[in-house]
Image (spheres, grey):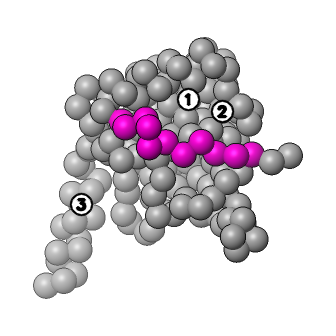
Amino acid sequence: MKIVFLSIMILISDFVYAIPNGVKPIDQLDVGKYMGKWYEIARLDFYFEKGLNNTTAEYSLKNNGKIKVVNRGYDFEKDKWKVAKGKAKFQTDIRNGALKVSFFGPFYSEYNIISVDNDYSYALVIGKNTEYMWILSRNKTIPEELRSKYLNLAQKAGILVENLIWVEHGN
């Protein structure tokens, strides 16, 4: 019975798509430009990243059309790097910013690219609900005008921006 239930949950997780009300992923994603290393500028904290700084995400397109994901961050209390390897796949087509990402076998969670600047240097990502949000940059900083823009977009999506963790990046 447990195996049947688990199988049904896996099937449902592949077809059910969650996103906060009023949030729309970009619809003209240039996947090639999005690939590569991103520095996490701000996030809503959750269990995997709790206490981490110097956090980055690196994306690379695989031959099968899925995306390899490598997240890493430094835990100063334990004096060690924490690395998570996963995969992502597109919800609909490769040009839509709605993806699902998995770090734990067959279980996926939403990854919605809400905004990206013209040269793919900065991005705003929101998860399946208002408890998951990231501001990403190709550099360790973000210009104030983009920071303000992304904070406004996040607030309109129902994100409590006062709860953001602003990531520190060393040299």
Nearer to us of marks 3 and 1 is: 1
Query: Residue 127 at what x, y percent from top left?
Result: 38, 43
Which residue is depicted at the point 49% across and 24% down? 150
Residue 162 included in the magenta stretch of the image: yes
- Please rate how many residues cluster around mark 1, counting C-alpha atoms within 10 Å: few if below 14, some from 14 to 19, many from 20: many
Q: CA distance from mark 2 to mark 1?
A: 6 Å
Q: In the figure, is residue 53 to the left or right of 23?
A: right
Q: CA distance from mark 3 to mark 2?
A: 34 Å
**What is the quadrant of the N terminus in the image?**
bottom left
Q: Which residue appears farthest toward the bottom when viewing the image?
A: 1
Q: Which residues make up the magenta segment?
A: 159-169
Disc 2: which residue: 137
Identify the secondary structure beneath mark 2: strand
Nearer to us of marks 3 and 2 is: 2
Q: Residue 63, can we see it?
A: no
Q: Pick whichever of labels 3 and 2 is earlier in the sequence.
A: 3
Query: Residue 159 at what x, y percent from top left?
Result: 36, 36
Q: Which mark is residue 11?
A: 3
- The three-letter amino acid code for the residue at tag 3 is Leu
Disc 1: which residue: 123
